Image: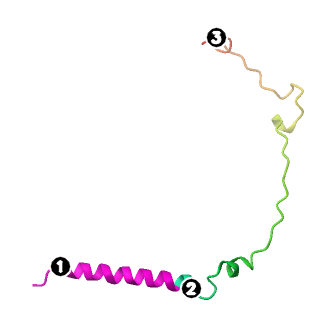
């Protein structure tokens, strides 16, 4: 009965060769150039959006602030 080790080694070599060949073929295939990939992508104008950080989207006049009460607020640690 033939040993399994040479068959495994041969299969590993064949698999490695197939992977390398497919990678090389994929990198050199027509249309794989990065300029070809990005030419059909529409350009989007990214305008900054300013968001006011006020509570409840209201003015900072104290009406929308949280009243913090409790016995642990004034405790010194």
15 left or right of 51 in image: left
Quarter containing the C terminus: top right
Q: Residue at x 90, y 33 (%)?
A: 59
User: Above or below — where is 69 with respect to 9?
Assistant: above
**Residue matched to label 2:** 28
50 left or right of 35 in image: right
**Residue matched to label 3:** 75
Disc 3 element: loop
User: Above or below — where is 53 with respect to 75?
Assistant: below
Q: Residue at x 84, y 29 (%)?
A: 64
**Crowd band around label 1 with a 10 angstrom C-alpha radius: few (<14), some (14–19), many (20+):** few
Disc 2 element: helix
72 left or right of 8 in image: right
Write the start and end of the magenta stretch as one range. Answer: 1-25
**Crowd band around label 2 with a 10 angstrom C-alpha radius: few (<14), some (14–19), many (20+):** few
Residues at marks 3 and 1 touching, judged by CB atoms closer than 8 Å = no
Q: What numbered label is drawn on residue 4?
A: 1
Q: CA distance from mark 2 to mark 3?
A: 70 Å
Q: Earlier in the sequence, mark 1 or mark 2?
A: 1
Residue 30 in picture, x, y percent from top left = 61, 88
Q: Residue at x 85, y 58 (%)?
A: 47
Q: Earlier in the sequence, mark 2 or mark 3?
A: 2
Residues at marks 1 and 2 touching, judged by CB atoms closer than 8 Å = no
Verify whether residue 46 appears in magenta.
Answer: no
């Amino acid at each position: 009965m033939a040993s399994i080790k040479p068959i495994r080694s041969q299969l590993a070599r064949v698999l490695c060769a197939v992977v390398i060949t497919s990678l090389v073929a994929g990198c050199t295939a027509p249309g794989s150039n990065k300029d070809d990939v990005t030419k059909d992508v529409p350009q989007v104008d990214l305008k900054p959006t300013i968001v006011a950080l006020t509570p409840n989207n209201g003015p900072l006049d104290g009406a929308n602030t949280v009243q913090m009460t409790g016995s642990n607020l004034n405790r010194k640690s």
